[in-house]
Amino acid sequence: MKPLIIGNNKINNRVSEYFTSKNMDVTILSDVFQIRNITGEINDFTIQTKDITIKSSFIILTEQPTAKPLEINGLITKSIYDENITEYKPNNPKSEPTVFLLDYNDESPNSATITALENAATLARKKHQVYYLARFIRTAGPGIEESYKTAREAGVTFIKYNETKINANPENETFTLNISSGEQNLEINTKTVYSTGSWETGESFSYIAKKLNLTPNKLGYVTEDMYYLTPTLTSRKGVYHLTRDLIAERLEEGLDHIFTHATSIIKYPEQDAPTNGPAVIDEKKCVFCFNCHRACPHTALQPDYTKNRMHPLNLACAGCGICVTICPANALSLETRQGDGSIARQGDGSRQGDGSIVLFPHENKTIEPSPCLADEPSPGLEPSPCLIIFCENSGGSLIENQEKNNTLSIPCGGSIEAGKLSKHLLSHEKILIITCPDDSCRHFTGNKQACKQASHLQEILTSAGLPPDRIQTAKISPGMPKILQEEISMSF
C-alpha cells in the first residue's frame, strides 16, 4: 500500500514513520500548491503535480485551516500555533511578559490549550515571565492535567478570569490587558500576546480541499460529523484529515483509525459496500451535464472525457442517492443486491417486477403496495394520520412502526424530492421529515437538501391556500429519543 501525506506540518515525519513501520511505501508532499489534479478512489488515486505523477492507495491530509489571531486597534496578536514561539527572545524577558490568552472571543479548542501549555512551560524554563489567561480550566483531555502541572512547576502564572479588556497602542506596539477574576483586578502591559481568534480556511487549506473535492461544513472543516467515533474521515473515502485537536490530543489513535479503516476497505471492499448502492449510470441517457459530479459529497462520480459521460466509482460511493435525485435525465440509479442474489436498481424506493416496493434494502425487506407508500396513491381513500420519513443515520433510526403512523426509511435526506412528497400528501394528513442535525450529516449536505425540498413544498401549499404545516422537519440525532417523541407528539 502507498499512503500519501499532503500538507506542511511538523508531524509529517511522525506520520510517515508510523506507516513505514506497517511496511508501507510512504510519500510526503509538503507543498500543496505543487498539486495540479487528483483523480480516482481509494486504492487507486492518481495525483498529478507540476513535475511528477504519484500513485497512492490513500491520502492523509495534514494541512490545517488558518488560526487567525486577534486584532486590537490595528495591532495584531501572535498566533498560539506559531511554530517559532519558543524561539522568541524579548529584549528583557523579566520585564516584558509573554501572555497566552485563551477564550477571549469564543471558547478555545483543546489543541490551543495543549499547545499554549507546552510553549508556556518552555518559555518559563528560559526565565521568561509568562502569564496563562483563560476563562475555562480544562482537565478532560489526555495528559492535560500533567501539562498544567509541568507549566506551574516551570513558573507559569495562571489566571482564571471572568472578564478581560484589551487596549492596544500601535505606536509603541504595546497591549494593555485589564483582567478581572471576580475578586482581584490586574493590569498587564506587554508587546507579546499569543491568542486564538477566528478560524479561517486560508489559501493553502482552501486550495487542497478544493483539489481533493472535499465537502466542508460552514466552519470550513472537512472531517466527519462524529469526530469522536470517526475522527479522521472526510467526505471522500480514502482521504483522511488529521486535525489540530486530534494531533494535540490523540495522534496515535488517529493514525490507528486511518490504518484500520483504509486497509479494511482495500482488503475487504464488499464489507464496506453501501447498503444502497453503488450508483449505476445508463450511458445512453447521460447528457454529461456534471450535475451529479458537483452534487456528490463523496466525489464518487468522475468525468470520463473519452466517452463523454460520468463514471461512478464503486468504492467511493456511499449510496446516499443524491445523484439519483438531481439527475435531470434519470440516467442514474442505485444498485442493491437482494438476499436471493438478484439486483434491484432504485432511487427512493424501487418497484419490483411483482409490484412490491423495496423500502428497506439494507434489511432485504419488501412490502406490498399500499395507498400510503405507493408512488401513485389511490384516490378516494381516507388519509392515514401521518408519515414519518427518516434517513438511516438520523434520530429516525429510533422509530419502530407505530399503530397510527407509517414510517419510511431512506438512505439520505438528500434523496427527498418535493414531487414525491406531494404525492404522499394525497394519502397522509401530515408528513414529518427527520434529518440529522446541522453539520452532523455524514453526507454533509443531505439534511440541508431535505429541508430545502420541504420548504419548497410548504411554499406551494401556502400559494394554494392550504396549511403549510402539513409538512414539517425535525433535526434529531440517535441520542435524542425524548426529543424525538416530543417532535412526533407535537407534529401529530
Image (tube, rainbow, N blue to C red):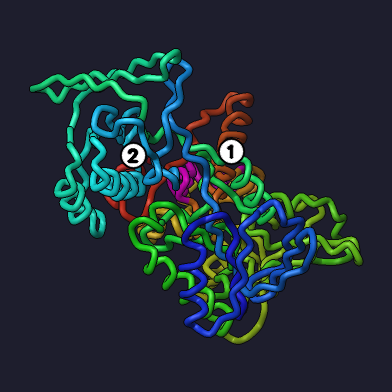
Q: Residue furthest left?
A: 183
Give residue 303's mark: none
Horizontal side of 13 relative to 328 (left or right) equals left
- Which quarter of the image is occupied by the N terminus? bottom right
- Circle 2 SS class: loop
Which residue was labeled with disc 1?
Answer: 452
The answer to whether one can see residue 404 in this image is no
**Mark 1 Cα-neighbour bin, 10 Å: few <14, some 14–19, many ≥20:** some
- Determine whether 20 is above or below 275 in the image: below
Q: Which residue is located at x 84 percent, y 64 percent?
A: 304
Q: Picture coordinates of residue 114 (x, y %)?
A: 30, 50
Q: Which residue is located at x 45 percent, y 50 percent?
A: 440
Along the line of sight, which residue is nearer the eye, 447 or 358? Answer: 447
Whether the residues at callouts 2 and 1 have beta carbons within 8 Å, the answer is: no
Q: Picture coordinates of residue 267 (x, y %)?
A: 56, 84
**Residue bounds of the magenta highlight:** 422-440
Q: How many marks?
A: 2
Res. 490 image quadrant: top left
Q: Which residue is located at x 48 percent, y 56 percent?
A: 224
- Determine whether 398 is above or below 457 in the image: below
> Does the stretch in magenta take in 374?
no
Along the line of sight, which residue is nearer the eye, 64 or 277? Answer: 64
- Circle 1 SS class: helix
Give residue 108's mark: 2
Q: Picture coordinates of residue 340 (x, y %)?
A: 59, 86
Q: Picture coordinates of residue 125 (x, y %)?
A: 24, 48
- Which quarter of the image is occupied by the C terminus? top left
Amino acid type, callout 2: Ser
Q: Residue furthest front?
A: 91
Along the line of sight, which residue is nearer the eye, 354 or 219? Answer: 219
Between the residue at mark 2 and the residue at mark 1, the CA separation in whole angstroms equals: 33 Å
